Image (spheres, rainbow, N blue to C red):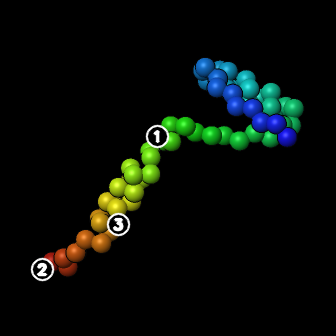
Amino acid sequence: MESIIVHPKNSMELTALKSVLKDMGIEFEKFHTRNQFHNKKTVQKINDRKEKKINKNQKPKGL
């Protein structure tokens, strides 16, 4: 089956498209592009920092 990608200019267009697709019984997927700018190096750095924070030497409280 063919696929189409639509880039609505505003929220009103997006809402109209969703309602038409729902009324016609057409399945659609949501795809958010906001957080897709990270490349592999950036993602690796973020994961390394998280691991470093988790593996910190923790002092016992009260001492």
For badge 1, the amino acid type reads Phe
Decide which of tag 3 and tag 2 comes sooner along the chain.
Answer: 3
Mark 3–mark 2 distance (CA, rounded to whole Å): 25 Å
Which residue is disc 3 drawn over?
51
> Residue type at mark 2?
Leu
Residue 53 placed where, x, y %? 29, 65
Badge 3 crowding class, 10 Å Cα cut-off, few under 14, some 14 to 19, many 20 or more, is: few
Real-space Cα separation, disc 1 to disc 2, in angstroms: 44 Å
Q: Quadrant of the C terminus?
A: bottom left
Residue count near mark 1 (Cα–Cα under 10 Å), binned few <14, some 14–19, many ≥20: few
Q: Secondary structure at mark 1?
A: loop
Residue 43 placed where, x, y %? 42, 53
Q: Is residue 35 left or right of residue 62?
A: right
Q: Secondary structure at mark 2?
A: loop
Residue 37 spot, x, y in % from top left: 46, 40
- In the displayed structure, does residue 43 sit left or right of residue 13? left
Q: Residue shown at 75%/39% (left/top)?
A: 28
Q: Which residue has dot 2 on it? A: 63
Residue at 51% over, 42% down: 36
Mark 2, Cα crowd under 10 Å, few <14 / some 14-19 / many 20+, is few
Residue position for label 1: 37
Query: Which residue is more in the foreground, 30 or 38?
Result: 38
Q: Nearer the viewer, mark 1 or mark 3?
A: 1
Query: Which quarter of the image is occupied by the N terminus?
Result: top right
Q: Earlier in the sequence, mark 1 or mark 2?
A: 1
- x and y percent of residue 56 in the render? 25, 71
Q: CA distance from mark 1 to mark 3?
A: 22 Å
Q: Earlier in the sequence, mark 1 or mark 3?
A: 1
